[in-house]
Amino acid sequence: MRRYYFISDDLDDLSQIEKELEARGMTTPQIHVLSMDDAGLQKHHLNDVAPLMRRDVFRTTAKAFVFGFLCAVLVMAFAIFSGATQSIGWAPFVLLAIVVMGFITWEGGMWGIQEPNIHFKRFEDVIKSGKHVLYVEVTKGREEMMMKEVVSHHPSLQAAGLEASPSGLLIDAENSASRFVKWAP
């Protein structure tokens, strides 16, 4: 899955683009608009980027989890090689390893909530200037349809790059949940 970025200053045009993409089989979780104009996004019924996704929480928490795990391994290695487990037992060291790992992971999340999402950082100046960033998560084989049938009909839309999408599983989960909600009574 790839993520295509576009810049626009017209929410009406972005609303039309979203409708055209959905009419051609794309789902709402694949289409997002990043903007400072939250009221305008609601008025035009555009899929906004969730506040938590605007922050770098998930990436920094994952990094901190790995670091915390390594620190927990160090605590357990100290316990094994120091011989302290023979006199005071394993319980304090296991508890300390869990606390160290949990605290470092939590701190990583707190650090990430203060940082903008690494994928959106390059658009900060664009968004502050009042423009909007549309990004579309496209599966392989659908790229040509999006570019030829939709984007080419909107000349005010400015291409702003593409990258591999880190959220393919999340989109699949959202689509499955949506189908389940429609199916369930």
Image (spheres, rainbow, N blue to C red):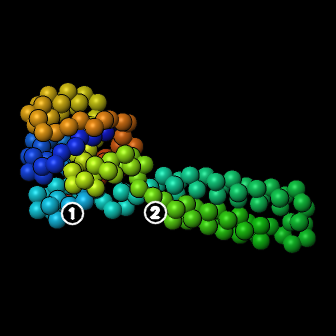
Residue 179 percent coordinates (x, y): 21, 52
The answer to which of marks 2 and 1 sits earlier in the sequence is 1
* Location of mark 1 (residue): 38
- Asked whether the viewer can see residue 36, the reply is yes
Q: Residue at x 20, y 37 (%)?
A: 158
Instruction: Please state if 53 lies on the left or on the right of 181 as rendered.
Output: right
| Amino acid at the residue labelled 2 | Gln
Mark pair 2, 1: CA separation: 20 Å
Q: Residue at x 10, y 37 (%)?
A: 154
Instruction: Please state if 94 lies on the left or on the right of 139 as rendered.
Output: right
Residue 83 percent coordinates (x, y): 91, 61
Residue 12 percent coordinates (x, y): 8, 51
Front residue of 64/101: it is 64
| Amino acid at the residue labelled 1 | Asp
Picture layout, residue 68 above or below residue 119? below
Q: On the rendered image, what quadrant is the C terminus found in?
A: bottom left
Q: Residue at x 22, y 43 (%)?
A: 7
Q: Residue 24: name its quadrant.
A: top left
Any mark on residue 13, and which? none
Instruction: Please state if 178 lies on the left or on the right of 84 as rendered.
Output: left
Front residue of 157/170: it is 157
Q: On the rendered image, what quadrant is the N terminus found in?
A: top left
Total marks placed:
2
